Image (tube, rainbow, N blue to C red):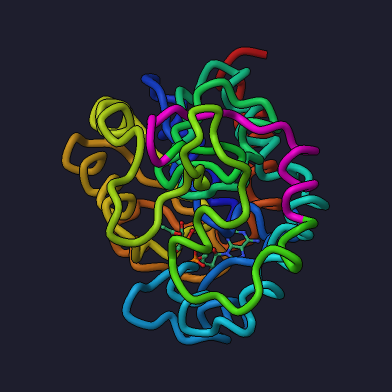
Amino acid sequence: MSNLMDKAVEAIGKGGYGTALTGAGISAESGIPTYRDPGNLYDQYDQGKQGGMLGVLMTNPEKAPEILSTFFNKLQEAKPNTGHIGLVELEKMGLLKSVITQNVDGLHRLAGNSKVLELHGSIYRMLCTVCGIKKQMEQNDLFAIADEIPNKLGTITSITEIMTGILPPCSCGGPQRFDFVSFGESVQELNEAVLDVTSCSWMLIVGTSGVVHPAATLPTYAKNNDAFLIEINPKESDLTSQCDIFLKGSAGQVVPELVNALKKAGVGNK
Ligand code: OAD
């Protein structure tokens, strides 16, 4: 590992800026389970035709209130871990320009990264399905709403019910849904993400299986523009073969190790 870490430090030390692409794995040590690891949501439940979390809820309607309540309870307890905090350090050191995440859990913002591109949206935003206005939610408001899930959702019969049956109506009277992206919908902030990855010198890919596009295409864009790709994951992903370096291990352990190695080598602002 130390030889690989040295190579990562050398690549980052060459200058330019970096971007990070993150997935559910970076939040695993904050207590939020990933989707595809053994025993987790997609391993446990059929996703049906719709696919994703909504597919699971539709295919297993009797389990939907329990699945959603468990998800919100874990979210409520979750705090940024040393992996998230390491990415904030990289930004403070003047090395990391942006964090591009597939996560909807808001932990990168909470940790303190200033440019977080949330490709799959955020669970902390509501979107009015009539007037299109988006509203940020306070954590406490979201969790007060989430507490009502078992009462509000009986046996789910439609996607509309899942999306709008939980949230209060908009001031225009229209039903509001969570502003997260489900399968078949367009991702958010993609243009900005593409701009960053096509002009970065290095990219850190942390905790994603790399199977969901277009997020999983971003490393290819970076690579085609000569960026150096560093992956951090306890196991190989669909992106590993494209990466220049694979740092095997958990985000909470390896991201801080990288930060320390960079500091020791005098790379970045103190
Ligand atoms: P996955 O569940 O597909 O993959 C999680 C990845 O995290 C795997 O590669 C694990 O090996 C890795 N991992 C597990 N623990 C880790 C740790 N402590 N540190 C670092 N890595 C760890 O999650 P995503 O790749 O994020 O989309 O999934 C992509 C998208 O599929 C999600 O955004 C979601 C889902 O359906 C939508 O909901 C639209």
> Residue at the location (34% across, 54% down)?
243
In this orientation, does residue 17 appear? yes
Q: Please provide percent x and percent y for residue 70.
A: 74, 68
Tell me if 80 is positioned left or right of 53 in this view. Answer: right
User: Which residue sits furthest front?
Assistant: 173
Which residue is at the front of the view, 83 or 137? 137
Q: Which residues are magenta?
A: 129-146
Numbered circles on residues, count: 0
> Does the rendering let one see residue 20?
no
**Residue 59 horizontal/vertical position (percent):** 47, 83
Q: Residue furthest left?
A: 224
In the figure, 71 relative to 85: above or below?
below
Q: Is residue 130 magenta?
A: yes
Between 149 and 223, the residue placed more toward the observer is 149
Above/below status of 13 relative to 164: above
**Is residue 178 or residue 265 the one in the foreground?**
178
Of the 4 image quadrants, the one containing the N terminus is bottom right
Residue shown at 45% from the left, 22% from the top: 97
Residue 113 spot, x, y in % from top left: 60, 26
Which residue occupies 52% across, 53% down?
164
* Rendering quarter of residue 147: bottom right
Residue 255 image offset from top left, x and y in percent: 63, 44
